[in-house]
Image (tube, rainbow, N blue to C red):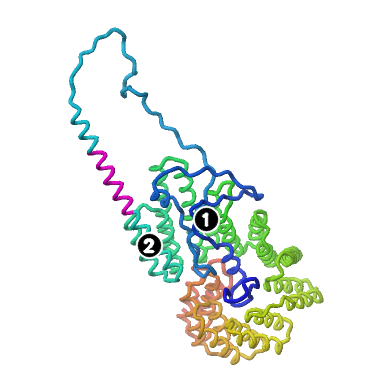
């Protein structure tokens, strides 16, 4: 999309969830900590960080990795700081006193003087200073090497080389085995590679090493860093459970992560709120998701947040509230085609057909001359039932070099039950973009309509290999159903059993598993 008009948001191939998640997670590394935002928009007073070496300053920096599939490649986030209390005070003995003495001597008492040699004490002090210097040099050198290796891991992660990133983060941890931030980065790389158990272990290690740091560094800066890293560890664990389909556990962990923010909400907390809303909606708690979006809107009246809350209300069956939110979103930003289509569906559900038709006409007036713009107009024509106009718009988009129009053409042809033509469009798209799990899912469904079950299973398997949590549920279910059509009862049972283990709250999966058990 960044090749074209960034102001106009595409309908295909990305999903509504992913567009907003990408925008919410845009971040950049900075030397100045972000000033957090309190609910209501006021800024918190943040104490200046304490002094220390440059290495210490870098060590306190929190590295924030976003999950794969985002629009931006910068995965290093700003360190969130919060106002903390004063560090505990240590009581030192009074000058000149010795442990166990009162520090006072009786008057007029003569003491026998003993001549002492200063050499042993001087030598011991010199040796201690030398050991401290050697240890400090070792730690700083070792940390510097770990930091450079960590940066290499971040670059690999940004490039999508997740297995290599895992290996490099492990090397960084070997250099600095108590660095909680490296464990957080490792956990995110494991998630991207689909290794959720390993990811959870990494986040547990991040928490364990953060707690250890809080004992070693008894000051406000360390406490701030501890809370920040623990928050990211809980966030990461929540993402792992969300990706694995354990939505209730993900909701619990995202809520725990937010407890480390106190009253101060910044970019990280907004990010967690969006994840929380997604987990709630996927667990079937659409009203809970709407409430979470309300929290987001209270912090930042964003048009996309209104759109997502409208979609949550729509899922909950509250079309009136959905309509109000979607209209607010359009009033704030008239350049998101998705909002128009969502509002169209909500109005149609309320049998407001004339108003719904008017909304599609308004969407056509958004204009734009890029290939993506023409593709978006093609989808509007498709919704209007004007398949000839849709085909013309999609072909114009393809001539402009926008390959996403293949997906629009394919969907339009499927609506007309031209499955051969649709399959050809999906194949043309996937020949150029093999990283779109949703495209593989739709292609597989098209192949099933053609009774090409073997090819359909292969398409679903290719989509699953991309590890896209937004589509994995549909892909896993469809692959198992395809095996049913092929009368591979054992294979279908094994696939559906794995599906139910991952998504235990799915009633269709439970029903199909019970059916397949008859053949075992």
User: Residue 75, percent across and down?
Assistant: 48, 63
Magenta span of residues: 127-142
Which residue sits at x=52%, y=77%?
Answer: 437
Q: Which residue is mark 1?
A: 253
What element does badge 1 sit on?
helix
Front residue of 149/477: it is 149
Q: Quadrant of residue 323?
A: bottom right
Label 1, label 2: how many angstroms apart (C-alpha)?
24 Å
Left of 31 or right of it: where is 148? left
Mark linked to residue 297: none
Task: Inspect the magenta stretch and tell me whether residue 129 lies in it.
Answer: yes
Front residue of 519/345: it is 345
User: Residue 159, percent across and down?
Assistant: 45, 71
Q: Taken as a whole, is the magenta stretch helix, strand or loop?
A: helix
User: Residue 313, percent across and down?
Assistant: 69, 64
**Residue at the farthest top position:** 108
């Amino acid at each position: 999309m960044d090749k074209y008009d960034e102001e106009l948001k595409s309908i295909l191939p990305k999903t509504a969830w992913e567009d907003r998640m990408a925008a919410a997670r845009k971040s950049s590394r900075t030397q100045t900590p972000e000033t957090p935002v309190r609910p209501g928009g006021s800024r918190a007073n943040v104490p200046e960080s304490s002094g220390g070496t440059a290495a210490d300053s870098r060590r306190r920096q929190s590295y924030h990795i976003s999950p794969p599939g985002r629009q931006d490649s910068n995965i290093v986030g700003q360190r969130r700081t919060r106002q903390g209390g004063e560090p505990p005070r240590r009581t030192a003995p009074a000058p000149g006193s010795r442990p166990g003495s009162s520090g006072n001597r009786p008057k007029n008492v003569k003491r026998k003087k003993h001549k002492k040699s200063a050499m042993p004490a001087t030598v011991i002090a010199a040796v201690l200073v030398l050991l401290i210097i050697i240890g400090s040099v070792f730690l700083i050198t070792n940390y510097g090497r770990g930091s450079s290796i960590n940066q290499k891991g971040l670059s690999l992660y940004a490039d999508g080389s997740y297995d290599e990133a895992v290996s490099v983060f492990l090397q960084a941890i070997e250099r600095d085995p108590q660095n909680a931030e490296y464990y957080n980065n490792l956990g995110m790389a494991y998630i991207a590679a689909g290794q959720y158990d390993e990811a959870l272990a990494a986040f547990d290690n991040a928490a364990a090493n953060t707690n250890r740091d809080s004992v070693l560094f008894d000051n406000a800066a360390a406490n701030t860093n501890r809370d920040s890293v623990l928050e990211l560890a809980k966030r990461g664990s929540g993402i792992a459970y969300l990706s694995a389909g354990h939505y209730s556990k993900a909701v619990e962990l995202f809520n725990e992560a937010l407890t480390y923010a106190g009253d101060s909400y910044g970019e990280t907390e907004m990010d967690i709120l969006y994840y929380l809303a997604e987990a709630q909606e996927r667990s079937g708690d659409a009203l809970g998701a709407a409430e979470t979006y309300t929290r987001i809107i209270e912090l930042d009246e964003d048009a996309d947040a209104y759109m997502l809350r409208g979609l949550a209300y729509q899922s909950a069956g509250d079309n009136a509230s959905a309509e109000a939110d979607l209209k607010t979103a359009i009033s704030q930003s008239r350049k998101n085609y998705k909002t128009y289509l969502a509002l169209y569906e909500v109005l149609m559900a309320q049998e407001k057909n004339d108003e719904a038709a008017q909304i599609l006409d308004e969407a056509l007036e958004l204009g734009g001359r890029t290939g993506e713009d023409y593709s978006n107009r093609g989808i509007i024509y498709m919704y209007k039932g004007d398949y000839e106009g849709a085909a013309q718009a999609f072909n114009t988009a393809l001539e402009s070099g926008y390959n996403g129009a293949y997906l629009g053409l394919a969907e339009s042809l499927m609506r007309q039950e031209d499955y051969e033509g649709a399959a050809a469009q999906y194949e043309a798209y996937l020949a150029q973009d093999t990283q779109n799990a949703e495209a593989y899912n739709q292609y597989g469904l098209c192949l099933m309509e053609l009774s090409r079950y073997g090819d359909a299973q292969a398409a679903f398997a290719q989509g699953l290999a991309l590890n896209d949590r937004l589509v994995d549920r549909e892909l896993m279910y469809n692959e198992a159903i395809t095996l049913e059509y092929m009368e591979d009862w054992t294979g279908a049972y094994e696939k559906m059993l794995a599906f139910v283990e991952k998504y235990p709250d799915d009633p269709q999966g439970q029903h199909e598993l019970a059916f397949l058990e008859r053949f075992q």
